[in-house]
Amino acid sequence: MTLKTEFRDGFLLGRSHIAGSVDELFAESYDVAVLVPSWDRRSICIAEARHWRAAVSIILFFKTRDSQGLRDAHDKVIHDFASENCGEVTVIEADSLKVDETWLQLIKKLVVLRDARKQPLRMFIDGSACPRYYLLGLVAATLGSGLVSQISVMYAEGRYPEKGTEEPRSEEIAFTEGQWRAIAIPALEGTYSPGKKRFFLVSIGFEGWKTMRVVSRSDPDRVSILRANPGTQDEYTERALVDNQALLRHYCIPEEQIVQAPAGDAIAAWKALSESSTDRSLEENSYYLCSGTKPHSLALGLRAMCLKSPAVLYNLPEGHKVVNISPTGKYWRFEITSLTAA
């Protein structure tokens, strides 16, 4: 296990570690773990951890299935893993599009656990297939309130399908169906001041035309981007930039307003955002749009937690599409600690 980045801002301390083995990264015990099986093959990588333990595990079983039977197989792997390595297993069956209902179930369970232990919890989240709404919401709501003292987030880098040949928009991978509706993530709603201009900071990914639609509907006065450079694969670095050329051209985004950070390192991206000159909180209402990698979305959440004023937005789709994603064999651990939790 290699320490890649360490960064502190305000009450938060973050460390990122990388390894070629899940077992090497996670060989300890937690008070509570949130596990999310998916058709994404990265969602079962945690089952390779032989020395991982948790007192309580919460498994999110989303109702959407796939025709290949991947969800059926992966659900069993994760449930068996949790049953063998956790003292208690709680299953939440959820609709991936009804985020409010699922969020309430999650946070209520954590409050009960915190009250029973009478001290802040140590939490594990498998972020590889966990929707950003819950991942960022859990980090912000629990660390910010004292429910949790430390969170370890796992992220497995993925290999995505090659570009298609059909037109139009053959350059993109579609993870979602229909249009996106940007909604605020719990505990990251930000603040709003009438009269201020509107600023969007956008992490960019492969679904560039949908990102452009969301941003243009909001009619911002200014736009900056968080770009994955380098990408998790060499070809992804340029691929995401090409997919978002319309956004860069339309808003005339200058080079100094493009923040660049490694695609897989959430803490390095958080540090890069904190050292950038993108935010002008005295003049603008800030909105962070999570359209890029999962680690970059986490970085946006951490930056917003420290500034307190930006709202972090989740792209709620009309549906989710099955995309064949496989792990590359590179695994990350993001350890986020509240320095004020007692």
Image (tube, rainbow, N blue to C red):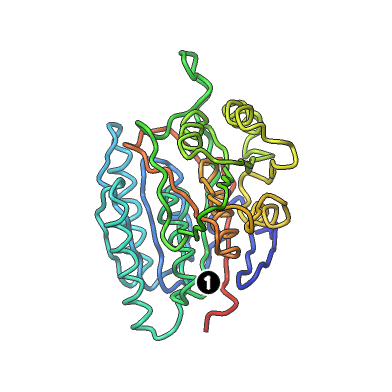
Give x and y (percent) for residue 177.
Answer: 35, 32
Task: Give the residue displayed 51% in from the left and 38% down from the top.
Answer: 219
Q: Total of numbered circles in the picture?
A: 1
Give x and y (percent) for residue 254.
Answer: 72, 36
92 or 51, nearer to the observer: 92
Task: Give the residue displayed 61% in from the left and 69% down from the top.
Answer: 12
94 or 201, nearer to the observer: 201
**Could you tell whether 271 is left or right of 333 in the image?**
right
Residue found at the very far front of the displayed protein: 195
Task: Give the residue displayed 28% in from the left and 50% down from the top.
Answer: 98
Residue 202: image quadrant is top right
236 or 341, nearer to the observer: 341
Crowd rating for badge 1 (residues with CA inside 10 Å; few <14, some 14–19, many 20+): many
Give x and y (percent) for residue 183.
Answer: 40, 49
**164 w.r.t. 173: above or below:** above
Q: Give the residue type at disc 1.
A: Gln
Give x and y (percent) for residue 293.
Answer: 55, 43
Look at the numbered disc 1 and give the secondary structure of its residue.
strand
- What residue does disc 1 label? 150
**105 w.r.t. 291: above or below:** below
Residue 24 visible to an observer of this rendering:
no
Residue 130 visible to an observer of this rendering:
yes
**75 w.r.t. 252: above or below:** below
Q: Quadrant of the N terminus?
A: bottom right
**Could you tell whether 65 is left or right of 10 in the image?**
left
